[in-house]
């Protein structure tokens, strides 16, 4: 019985260690620009752990580097849904998705995410700067100027 317990204990320890190692290995692959491998590994791991925000975030980064914007957007949305297990803050995830929406020429969606940034961090000059620049691009200069004034006030 003691032997069985020892075997089960070490099997569980190996499993937990392996689960902990995967995200770190994916981070390593990202740092080495091995984006196809990241997608492959993260996809396989997400089949086993479909609520792992960190895996979605990492795969979103890889998709972005591979210029697969719609998949990156989908994964950022999932990372936001499971933000409690993500490797980035909810603020960072919304910022990334807002910028991606803006790049994909979807200003209404970008504006929603920038508004969320401001709700999450009302003293973030960066959030007001992003929203102000978007307002300017949308031709809403009065709103843009209000945000730029807020940026100046926050940076004092």
Image (cartoon, rainbow, N blue to C red):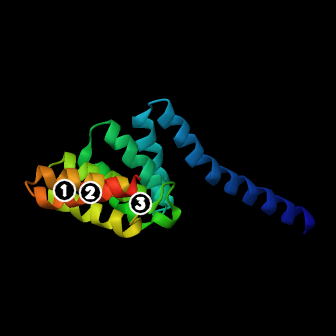
Whether 8 is drawn above or below 30: the answer is below
Whether 68 is drawn above or below 87: the answer is above
Task: Give the secondary structure at mark 2.
Answer: helix
- Asked if residue 130 can be seen in this view, the reply is yes
Residue 133 screen position, x and y as percent: 21, 50
Which corner quadrant of the image does residue 13 belong to? bottom right
| Residues packed near mark 3 inside 10 Å, few (<14), some (14 to 19) or many (20 plus) | many
Earlier residue among tags 1 and 3: 3
Residue at label 1? 145
Which corner quadrant of the image does residue 15 belong to? bottom right
What's the residue at 92%, 66% (across, down)? 2
| Residues packed near mark 1 inside 10 Å, few (<14), some (14 to 19) or many (20 plus) | some
Residue at label 2? 149
Q: CA distance from mark 2 to mark 1?
A: 6 Å
**Residue 24, numbered circle:** none
Residue at label 3? 91
Q: Say if mark 2 contacts mark 1, CB within 8 Å.
A: yes
What's the residue at 25%, 45% (across, down)? 69
Residue 140 screen position, x and y as percent: 10, 58
Would residue 24 be found to the left or right of residue 35 on screen? right
Task: Give the secondary structure at mark 1.
Answer: helix
What's the residue at 12%, 49% (across, down)? 137
Which corner quadrant of the image does residue 94 belong to? bottom left
What's the residue at 24%, 65% (across, down)? 112
Would residue 36 be found to the left or right of residue 45 on screen? left
- Asked if residue 74 can be seen in this view, the reply is no
Q: Nearer the viewer, residue 148 or 9?
A: 148
Q: CA distance from mark 1 to mark 3?
A: 23 Å
């Amino acid at each position: 019985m003691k032997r069985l317990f020892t075997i089960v204990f070490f099997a569980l320890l190996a499993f937990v260690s392996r689960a902990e190692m995967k995200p770190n290995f994916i981070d390593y692959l990202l740092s080495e620009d091995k984006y196809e491998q990241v997608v492959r590994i993260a996809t396989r791991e997400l089949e086993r752990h479909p609520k792992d925000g960190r895996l979605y975030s990492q795969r979103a980064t890889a998709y972005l580097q591979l210029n697969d914007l719609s998949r990156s957007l989908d994964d950022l949305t999932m990372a936001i849904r499971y933000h409690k297990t993500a490797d980035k803050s909810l603020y960072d995830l919304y910022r990334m998705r807002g910028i991606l929406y803006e790049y994909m020429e979807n200003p209404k969606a970008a504006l929603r995410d920038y508004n969320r940034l401001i709700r999450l961090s009302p003293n973030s000059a960066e959030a007001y700067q992003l929203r102000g620049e978007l307002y300017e691009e949308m031709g809403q200069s009065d709103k843009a100027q209000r945000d730029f004034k807020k940026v100046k006030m926050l940076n004092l």
